[in-house]
Amino acid sequence: MNITEQIKQLKIVPVVVIKDIADAEPTLRALCEGGLPVAEITFRTACAADAIKLGCEKFPDMLIGAGTVINAEQCNRAIDCGAKFIVGPGFAAEVAEVCRARGVLYLPGCVTPTEIITAISYGLETVKFFPCSNFGGLATLKALSAAFPAMTFMPTGGISEANVLEYLAFDKIIACGGSWMMKGTPDEIKAKTASAVALVK
């Protein structure tokens, strides 16, 4: 099964910010034990690459990707550390080129028709829609889908238990990215993750 299909089956991709490497293992274990063995570890912190590397070593069956990747250097570093997919807040041609050369799924943030056309020109079939709620949410996604019927989306930003089912009901959405289950202790993360999994199942 390819990475896109795995994401589609999981339905939710937790956006994980690791500020201290000591938090990486308990945080990722909480997600796995909560029933969601997937994480988009953001490249916004100094220990992000180390957290991806540790996660891939400790949880080999977990689908670990890198988020907030904005240039080729970060992209190569993330893939070298074991990232199985790359997510960006926007589209970066140099990241698209690295991912294409290395055979890694790239989900760039796209919110306009022009950005989606650029993504299509690089052979991409799925993009992140971010920040989702700020750019019109589901109504905008449906309008974009009418223009680009072959494109699928992973909306992220402003998604929670309150609206995730509404998004997932739209057939052009493969999964939703979110961080609502990531607050609190590892036990709290595990409980919120289990709740989210039960909801989408």
Image (cartoon, rainbow, N blue to C red):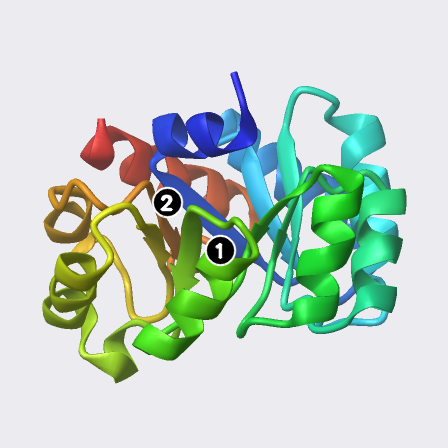
Q: Reading the chain from its start, which is encountered first: label 2 or label 1?
A: 1
User: Between marks 2 and 1, how big is the CA–CA gap?
Assistant: 8 Å
Return the residue nearer the eye: 157 or 194.
157
Return the residue nearer the eye: 178 or 137.
137
Q: Name the residue tied to disc 2.
A: 192
Q: Name the residue tied to disc 1.
A: 182
Q: Secondary structure at mark 2?
A: helix
* Relative to 94, residue 59 above or below: above
Left or right, 101 with reference to 134: right
**Which amino acid lies under the numbered mark 1 shown in the image of this protein?**
Met
The residue that appears at 55% across and 36% down in the rendered structure is 38
* Relative to 92, residue 11 above or below: above
**Which amino acid lies under the numbered mark 2 shown in the image of this protein?**
Lys
Residue 201 location, quadrant: top left
- The residue at the far front in this view is 121
Q: What x and y, as percent, mark residue 83?
A: 74, 42
- Whether residue 43 is visible to the viewer of this picture, yes or no, is no
Label at residue 8: none
The residue that appears at 34% across and 43% down in the rendered structure is 175
Q: What x and y, as percent, mark residue 76?
A: 86, 55
The residue that appears at 50% across and 50% down in the rendered structure is 124
Left or right, 60 with reference to 142: right
Q: What x and y, as percent, mark residue 114?
A: 38, 77
Other residues around mark 2 within 10 Å, as few (<14) / some (14–19) / many (≥20) = many
Mark 2 and mark 1 residues within 8 Å of each other at the beta carbon: yes
